[in-house]
Amino acid sequence: AQSVAQPEDQVNVAEGNPLTVKCTYSVSGNPYLFWYVQYPNRGLQFLLKYITGDNLVKGSYGFEAEFNKSQTSFHLKKPSALVSDSALYFCAVGGGRGSTLGRLYFGRGTQLTVWP
Amino acid sequence: DAGVIQSPRHEVTEMGQEVTLRCKPISGHNSLFWYRQTMMRGLELLIYFNNNVPIDDSGMPEDRFSAKMPNASFSTLKIQPSEPRDSAVYFCASSSRTERNQPQHFGDGTRLSIL
């Protein structure tokens, strides 16, 4: 069965500092991994995805994520945080053996707060 | 391109009333998902459709909940009778089933309050 863990409910970082939001996954076979962001009173917005190839994936708004197969992790990173990055971030996994086409399994979300 | 459209954006109603939430997926997408988001339980998948056919409804809380997709451009989620514990934000999402690795695109949700 596929699953995702986001070990931190909250991440706080000062503006201009690098940020990391952690995600680990469990899946049989090759995973497809996604990051989404949710702003208040909005739906989830797609940020980036890893399918295959280069382990470092670049996405929207300067975010990137690093796929690490040995650690089954897919951490979201940004070199310099902005106050406007404050939002709820979700990691999701799809694919894997036995999975239904198109279905994603979401983590519980990590609230990122960037202080000015 | 228009995104996923949900209506209404907000719904306040009294316990026992029927509630109908509506969703128009992105044109050309053939997978549709209904989610519920609460502080306590996070984001829960309720049901999803592929090519208008329900594939997995194991996340539907109980028989009071039902979902339909009469055609590729419209879906409804109905709660009858509604209860205060149904209060949540309900999201609809769609994706292209053709490619396994395509992201889901979410609407802005319906915030439901049952008094």
Image (cartoon, coloured by chain):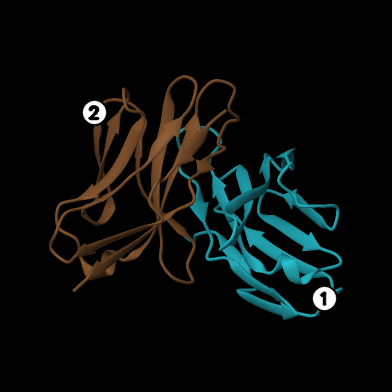
Chain colours: A brown, B cyan
Indicate the secondary structure of the residue bearing disc 1.
loop
The subunit carrying tag 2 is A
| Residue that mark 1 sits on | B15
Whether A65 is drawn above or below A70: the answer is below
Q: Are marks 2 and 1 in contact (CB under 8 Å)?
A: no
Specify whether residue A106 is in view.
yes
Q: Position of residue A53 (x, y in %)?
A: 27, 25
| Separation of residues labelled 2 and 1 (CA atoms) | 52 Å
Judge from the rendering whether residue B112 lies leftward or rightward of residue A19; answer left or right: right
Judge from the rendering whether residue A62 lies leftward or rightward of residue B87; answer left or right: left
Frontmost residue, B83 versus A60? B83
* Quarter in which the N terminus of chain A is drawn: top right
Q: Position of residue A60 (x, y in %)?
A: 28, 53
Q: Position of residue A40 (x, y in %)?
A: 44, 71
Determine which of the numbered discs, if any, sits on residue B97 in the image: none
Indicate the secondary structure of the residue bearing disc 2.
loop
Q: Marks 2 and 1: which is nearer the front?
A: 1
Q: Amino acid at mark 2?
A: Asp
Q: Amino acid at mark 1?
A: Met
| Residue that mark 2 sits on | A54
Frontmost residue, B30 versus A69? A69
Frontmost residue, B15 versus B104? B15
The residue under the point 12% across, 63% down is A16
Q: Are marks 2 and 1 on the same chain?
A: no
Q: Badge 1 local density, few (<14 within 10 Å), some, or many (20+)?
A: some
The residue under the point 65% across, 60% down is B23
Q: Position of residue A30 (x, y in %)?
A: 43, 22
Whether B110 is drawn above or below B70: the answer is below
The residue under the point 71% across, 46% down is B59
